Image: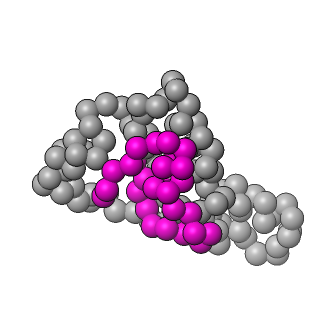
């Protein structure tokens, strides 16, 4: 059992297991809880402009450095980045990395 069809295919191709390899995606809830002050939070942290959303753990392998480099370019200087998720391994501090590139940051 694995979480993706791609990994299941790799397992079959590399390991040639005798048992069936089944991909079972991780479950999720369709009951999302939106806070009553969601619009106020968005206005406070993002403003009224467009923004990019990163969802995941802040880790070196996620490529946040490349994303922050791109957002530091003049054409995207006014673009906001919203990062949702826990800190992962590697000590990536997105706020510190953004500020080092001259990007503005907001508190959660």
The spot of residue 48 in percent (x, y) is 26, 33
- Locate the N terminus and report the quarter of the image it occupies: bottom right
Q: Is residue 91 magenta-colored?
A: yes
Q: Main secondary structure of the magenta part?
A: loop
The spot of residue 53 in percent (x, y) is 43, 45
Q: Is residue 103 above or below residue 58?
A: above
> For residue 50, what is the image quadrant?
top left
Q: Is residue 11 above or below residue 81?
A: below
- Locate the C terminus and report the quarter of the image it occupies: bottom left
> For residue 91, what is the image quadrant?
bottom right
The spot of residue 65 in percent (x, y) is 61, 49
* Residue found farthest to the top: 75
* Residue found farthest to the left: 36
Picture colour scheme: one colour
Total numbered labels: 0
Tell me which residue sits at (61%, 55%) in the image.
62
Tell me which residue sits at (86%, 68%) in the image.
16
Residue 24 appears in the picture as rendered: no
User: In the image, is 85 to the left or to the right of 38?
Assistant: right
Residue 106 appears in the picture as rendered: yes
Tell me which residue sits at (56%, 31%) in the image.
73
Q: Is residue 83 magenta-colored?
A: yes
The spot of residue 8 in percent (x, y) is 71, 62
> In terms of depth relative to the viewer, which is nearer, 18 or 44?
44
The span picked out in magenta is 82-108
Tell me which residue sits at (78%, 66%) in the image.
11
> In terms of depth relative to the viewer, which is nearer, 25 or 75?
75
User: In the image, is 8 to the left or to the right of 14?
Assistant: left
User: In the image, is 32 to the left or to the right of 91?
Assistant: left
């Amino acid at each position: 059992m694995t979480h993706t069809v791609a990994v299941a295919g790799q397992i079959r191709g590399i390991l040639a297991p005798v048992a069936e390899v089944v991909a079972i995606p991780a479950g999720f809830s369709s009951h999302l809880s939106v806070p009553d002050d969601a619009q106020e939070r968005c206005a406070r942290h993002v403003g009224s402009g467009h923004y990019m959303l990163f969802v995941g753990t802040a880790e070196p392998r996620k490529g946040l450095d490349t994303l922050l480099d791109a957002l530091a370019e003049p054409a995207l200087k006014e673009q906001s980045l919203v990062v949702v998720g826990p800190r992962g391994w590697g000590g990536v501090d997105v706020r510190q990395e953004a500020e080092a590139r001259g990007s503005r940051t907001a508190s959660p």
